[in-house]
Amino acid sequence: MILKNKRDYADYAKKLRSHPEFSPLSDKYIEQLINEMKVKTYHRGQILFDQGDTRDRFYYLIDGVCKSFHWDKNGDEQLYLYIRPQKAFPYIGLFEDDRYAYTVETMSEVKLAEFSMPIYEEVLRENPELMVNAVKEMSKIINTSETQLQRMVTTSAKCRVWNAILFIGQQIGEIQEDDTILVPYPITLVELSKVSGTTRETTSQMVQQLVAENKVQYNRKYFKILKIDDDSY
């Protein structure tokens, strides 16, 4: 669905301004982006773009959650990053790549704003402060990915599953008043097995152990992380 009511776009302009990746922009550039922006909704499980597709759109996630991943040479899915609301993407490949380096799939019903990639890159070039923010976002992405790789370098299936749950919690979880972390989106055991690099059966067994140890709750595909101790990493 494409929203055509321009009055709605004024609200999205305010939302863009509230986000560090857009806040430095003057009215001129906000208007430039808003004038060609399309706001769309997608159902869970839809592909926004595939690895190798022409890299022509830049996105700002308003509601919902997505995941980005790439396919290795064996055709296996390798998780790259989860994308939570109020985040823009993709940053990897700015000014260089003609094709998307990874695939992005919706994990819930989502609403997002789409911009022309050439126009966004033009705005980025003309706004040094915005460029700095983009570099910071790319650094965060790289650091998160490196940290995840380090956590997964272990032969212990239990540690891999536990660290995968922590990674998901860090990416899209919400801290509760009692300091637990709730992941407010359904995460299947198949999804968790992809993140942890273990089989679905092994993942199920490890989750049962973590539940028994009172480290997590897992109910109807929703995770809650109950405690994080020194052994978590």
Image (tube, rainbow, N blue to C red):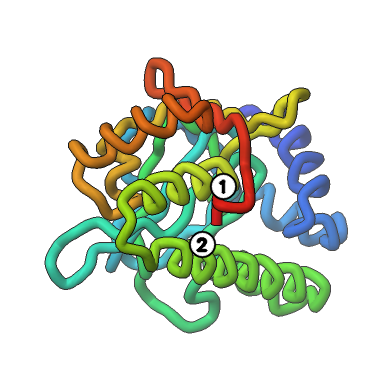
Q: Residue at x 81, y 48 (%)?
A: 17
Question: Is residue 151 shown above or below 59?
Answer: below
Q: Is residue 160 above or below residue 220?
A: below
Q: Secondary structure at mark 1?
A: helix
Q: In the image, which disc is placed on residue 76?
A: none
**Near-viewer residue (25 or 150):** 150
Q: Quadrant of the N terminus?
A: top left
Q: Nearer the viewer, residue 128 or 175?
A: 175
Residue 73 in the image: x percent, y percent? 16, 72
* Depth check, front residue: 142 or 209: 209
Q: Position of residue 185 (x, y in %)?
A: 48, 28
Which residue occupies 34% across, 41% down? 192
Question: Among all residues in the image, which is located at the extreme left?
Answer: 74
The residues tagged by marks 1 and 2 sit, at their Cα atoms, a distance apart of 16 Å
Q: Position of residue 111 (x, y in %)?
A: 53, 33
Q: Is residue 3 visible?
A: no
Query: Where does residue 162 sit, x and y in percent of width and height?
Result: 44, 45
Find disc 1 in the rendering and name its residue. Answer: 171
Q: Is residue 154 above or below residue 175?
A: below
Q: Residue at x 56, y 32 (%)?
A: 225
The answer to whether 18 is drawn above or below residue 217 in the figure is below
Closest to the camera, between mark 1 and mark 2, is 1
Using residue 88 as the reference point, say whether residue 146 is left or right of it.
Answer: left
Q: Is residue 87 visible?
A: yes
State which quarter of the image contains the C terminus.
bottom right
Task: Report the amino acid beneath label 2.
Answer: Pro
Label 2 Cα neighbours within 10 Å, binned few <14 / some 14-19 / many ≥20? some
**Residue 90 tag number:** 2
Q: Residues within 10 Å of mark 1 (few under 14, many from 20)?
A: some
Within the image, what quadrant is residue 183 found in? top right
Q: Nearer the viewer, residue 20 or 3?
A: 20
Q: Tag 1: residue type? A: Gln
